[in-house]
Image: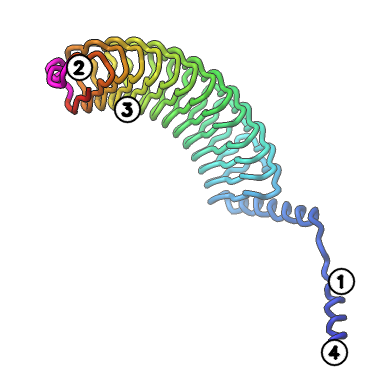
Amino acid sequence: MIKLLDLLIEQESILISRRSPEERQKNYLIATQKKIQQYIKDGGKGDLYLKGTPITSLPQGLNVEGNLNLQSTPITSLPQDLKVGGYLDLENTPITSLPQGLTVGGNLYLFNTPITSLPQGLKVRGNLNLSDIPITSLPQGLTVGGNLNLENTPITSLPQGLTVGGGLDLYNTKITSLPQGLTVGGNLGLTSTLITSLPQDLKVGGDLYLGNTPITSLPQGLKVRGNLNLYTTPITSLPQGLTVGGYLDLENTPITSLPQGLTVGGDLNLQGTPITSLPQGLTVGGELYLQNTSLSKNNTIEQIKTMVPGVKGNIFI
């Protein structure tokens, strides 16, 4: 009885066809292609999730109402005029370029791709994260509705008229100047860049980070709605009409004076500077930090309060 049972099991195992890895991959690709065709037949509604599939290309005329996830696929190209209503995820793919007419309604993820350039007129309504990829330039007409992250890229310049609805992060890039007409709705991060000046018509809706840069001057009439960080820069003076909505950090700079009528909405940090006097009409909405200055060595807190009655917070010497 046991021998007969063993014989039946052995015969059954012989009848079962064992697919090779190549056959399984081929069948997986066929199933994925059928999934895409069914998605198109259904009117391109909802998300198209293809993460980790063996897909290498997509059909022309594809429109995705929701998100398109191609992360960790071997895809090498996208169809012309592709429109994605949600996010487009191309992380960990070998794709080297994007098509003309591409529109992305959400975020565009390109982390760990060999992308070196973007198409003219690219529109991304969400965030565009290009950090740590070998991109060397941005196209004319690029519009980013959210944040644009270029941290740790070899990029050296930005296109004229660039508009970024959110923040623009250029940390640790080789950027030396910014284009005329640049508008940044959120924070502008220039820390550890080679930037030496800013354009006259620069608009920053959030914070402006210039710490650890060789910048020596700021444009007349600059308005920063958030914080302005100039920590350890070689800046020696500030322009007339400067307005800072948040804190102003000048710690360890060689600045010797401040402009008349300077208004700082938050704290003003002058620690470790050679500043010897404070201007009439100085307005500080937060605290005033004067440690390690000649002002702190030669004056009491009460004397400084008399000099600058416009300081609303505490004065630290």
Q: What residue type is labelled 4?
A: Met
For disc 2, the marked residue is: 282
Q: Is residue 306 above or below residue 28?
A: above
Tell me how far mark 1 sits from mark 3, CA to CA: 73 Å
Residue 308 lies, in percent from the top left, at 16, 17
Which element type, helix, strand or loop, lies under badge 1? Answer: helix
Q: What stretch is highlighted in magenta?
A: 299-311
The residue closer to the viewer here, 3 or 73, is 3
Label located before the other in sequence (4 or 1) = 4
What residue is at 36 percent from the left and 27 percent from the top?
A: 207
Which element type, helix, strand or loop, lies under badge 4? Answer: loop
Tell me how far mark 3 sits from mark 2, CA to CA: 18 Å
Where is the N terminus found, in terms of image quarters?
bottom right
| Dot 4 crowding, Cα within 10 Å, few <14, some 14–19, many 20+ | few
For disc 4, the marked residue is: 1
Nearer mark to the viewer, of 3 and 2: 2
- Say the numbered circle drawn on residue 14: 1
Tell me how far mark 2 sits from mark 4, CA to CA: 102 Å
Q: Which amino acid does label 3 sit on?
A: Gly
The residue closer to the viewer here, 112 or 202, is 112
| Dot 1 crowding, Cα within 10 Å, few <14, some 14–19, many 20+ | few
Tell me how far mark 4 sits from mark 1, CA to CA: 20 Å
- Say the numbered circle drawn on residue 128: none
